Amino acid sequence: MNPYGFVRLGPAAQREAAIRHDRFNGLSGRLYCQLTALTHLFIPKTQETARGQHQKLDLLRTADGRPLLPGSSLKGVIRSVAEAISGSCLTLPLGKGGEIEYRGRPPVSYRIPRGFEHCRDADHLCPACRIFGSLSGGNPFLGKIGLGDAVAAGPFETETITIEALMEPKPRHRAWYEDPNQRGYLRGRKFYYHRPLGPRRTEVRNEYNKTIEAVKPSAVFEFDLVYNNLTKAELALLIFALTLEPEMAYKVGMGKPVGLGSARIEIVGWEQIDRQARYRQLGSGVTALKGDLLSAEIARWQEEYHRAYANWQDSLADLRRIWTWDPSSRTDIRYPGQEWFRQNPRVPIERTP
Ligand SMILES: [Zn+2]
């Protein structure tokens, strides 16, 4: 099976002004989260690599040797989910004619539907930009959440493996990327399937593939997420994007097309801060939720997501189909060979073997 699928855009979300930081009348708090690796997981540290040679990449670690997922990259992944299930903007640079261009020979471009252009003004932001920020344009907005690095807590193991090349069909394969119902338009947002069988390993070591040191499944990473001044709908979107549904799992880090990066995120603690109570000196204004109370609160906000974002059920259904984690699945994922592309230039992605 092909390594990725598309999530339909759905209708474009309404754009609104972000509530400013100087008015603390929204919802604020801190979420304590755990990310559990379901397959091997790999985040490379910044390192010199020589071109034209087989690369050996080291794992990113803290000063005391614990594997680490930078908060910035985690934020990017959570954001991509929130965008996909709320009709938020496409954070891709557009060409002069308002189309997305992929470099290559020849370059390939796709138009995007109205209302999905990247937000450029803090007074008109899509849901994801109001939560995660929008730095393009002349009126930037820093967003209303902060994520710390996710650091491996407790025991973990690593393994050095040589993975297959991450090559994708290039230039962006039109029969897959184009909306089958709207010629010339982008089909949606791309997400990678899970491969419960684990990474696609190989004995071959050449300039196209890599040898990496990956964290083995069942390692647990911990991180905090602080949010300030969110609206009800924004908090609902954030909670749903973080926790998803019980049968779904995330893809994070490097090597997604070859079976790495499946992970589950769980909220294990929640402090809700009532800034008004603090201001009026009515106690600390902090409510800490754990156990059953925490589960009930998460379920309540998940329901709120379905209410507030009912227009994006199709997008969620697509993401659910792509991100369902079935540990017993033996389905392989790989790009069809070059010969297949030569013989089937127009076969759409859903009929690709
Ligand atoms: Zn936006």
Image: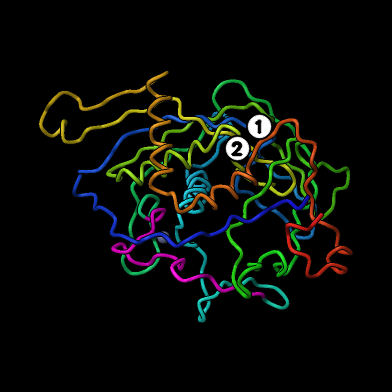
Q: Which residues are magenta?
A: 108-129
Q: Is residue 59 above or below residue 296?
A: below
Pick out the residue farthest to the left: 280
Give ligand 1's quarter of the image.
bottom left
Residue 182 appears at what percent x and percent y? 60, 72
Q: Is residue 208 above or below residue 232?
A: below
Reading the image, the residue beneath label 2 is 249
Pick out the residue farthest to the top: 291
- Residue type, numbered disc 1: Leu
Q: Is 39 displayed left or right of 279 in the figure?
A: right
- Residue type, numbered disc 2: Ala
Q: Specify the quadrant of the image occupied by residue 303.
A: top left
Q: Is 230 displayed left or right of 348 in the figure?
A: left
**Mark 1 crowd level (few <14, some 14–19, many ≥20, 10 Å Cα):** many
**Mark 2 crowd level (few <14, some 14–19, many ≥20, 10 Å Cα):** many
Reading the image, the residue beneath label 1 is 38
Residue 34 appears at what percent x and percent y? 51, 29
* Residue drawn at the location 11% of the way across and 28% of the way down: 281
Residue 165 appears at what percent x and percent y? 79, 52
Question: Which one is earlier in the sequence, the residue at label 2 or at label 1?
Answer: 1
Verify whether residue 127 appears in magenta: yes
Q: Specify the quadrant of the image occupied by residue 278.
A: top left
Q: In which quadrant will I find the C terminus? A: bottom right
Instruction: Identify the element where label 2 is drawn.
Output: loop
